[in-house]
Amino acid sequence: MESILNQLFWLWAPVSLLPEGLRIFLVLFVFLLLARTILVYIVPPCFNLLCRLLKKMLYLLSYPIMELISRMQRSRREAGKTGIPIWIDIIEEMFALFERFFNKMIQLFRKRKRNKAMIKRWTFYSATALAILLSAATMNNPNEWYTQKWKKAEAWLNQEPVHKQVSDAASPDTKELILNRNYKDGGNIRVAPTLTAARLYTIPNGETMHFLNEEQVDPKGIKWLKVQTANGIKGWISASIVREK
């Protein structure tokens, strides 16, 4: 498990140097390309096979039912009844409808092989456009759940390099903060300067934070400070619960 985390770290290290919007775009683009591969190459053959199996099952199911209906009709004719009940027509139409549907699906996936190049091209364009739109949505909506998930994932991926920077190259001018003594259960560091934002980390009392020289006041008048913990997590904490070390 540790080797996998190290590989993730070294894979993410050069990407973390890019602007945030470009990082989000690259991650989403790779994810969508993987999803495209599954949808284009794996799902259609599986769905085609499923349609063929269901068609076979339809034949196996319809044969005894239609045989039973045929015997009933023979008995009715022998009794002098020549009409066909409406429910028999409904059953026959249902079987015919399912058969046409399965044949259409099988035929559709046969055509897919001829249009493979066009499908690959348009799915690539769609993945690119969707990655751009999702990146813009993530950047422009800091309080939405997908942005908070991204912040948490990025903080986790950057945990090791940021920790090294803080421990090995901390500036002597950096202001260090700790929680007030009455917050024995710890304080919450959030992804955005508001009480409704998701919690990134609960810092224990006594653990040092580094103030990043950025502060904001939310609509409720609460002052927030942007801090960074010793393990590299960046977020916002209320100024009322911290003091300078």
Image: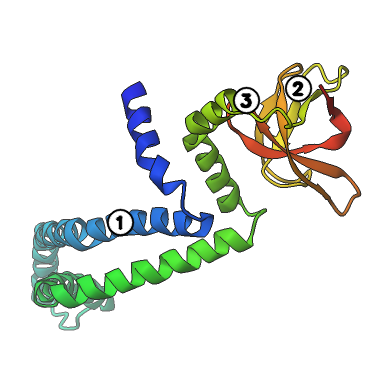
Q: Give the number of the mark in front: 1 or 3.
A: 3
- Confirm or deny contact between disc 1 and disc 3 (CB under 8 A): no
Alpha carbon of mark 1 to alpha carbon of mark 2: how far? Answer: 41 Å
**How is the model colour-coded?**
rainbow
Q: Give the number of the mark in front: 1 or 2.
A: 2
Element type at mark 2: loop
Q: Which residue is mark 3?
A: 230
Q: Where in the figure is residue 178, as x and y percent of width and height?
A: 78, 23
Q: Place residue 46 in its image quadrant.
A: bottom left
Label 1 packing within 10 angstroms: few (<14), some (14-19), many (20+): few
Q: Tag on residue 63?
A: none
- Confirm or deny contact between disc 1 and disc 2 (CB under 8 A): no
Rendered residue at 55%/24% (across/down): 168
- Confirm or deny contact between disc 2 and disc 3 (CB under 8 A): no
Q: 139 and 167: which one is in front?
A: 167
Q: Amino acid at mark 2?
A: Gly
Q: Which residue is mark 2?
A: 186
Q: Which residue is mark 1?
A: 35
Of callouts 1 and 2, which one flags the residue occurring earlier in the amino acid sequence? 1
Alpha carbon of mark 1 to alpha carbon of mark 3: how far? Answer: 37 Å
Q: Is residue 12 left or right of residue 99?
A: right
Q: Place residue 140 in its image quadrant.
A: bottom right
Alpha carbon of mark 2 to alpha carbon of mark 3: how far? Answer: 15 Å
Q: Where in the figure is residue 4, as x and y percent of width and height?
A: 32, 29
Residue lying farthest to the front in this orientation: 172
Label 2 packing within 10 angstroms: few (<14), some (14-19), many (20+): some
Rendered residue at 84%/51% (across/down): 218
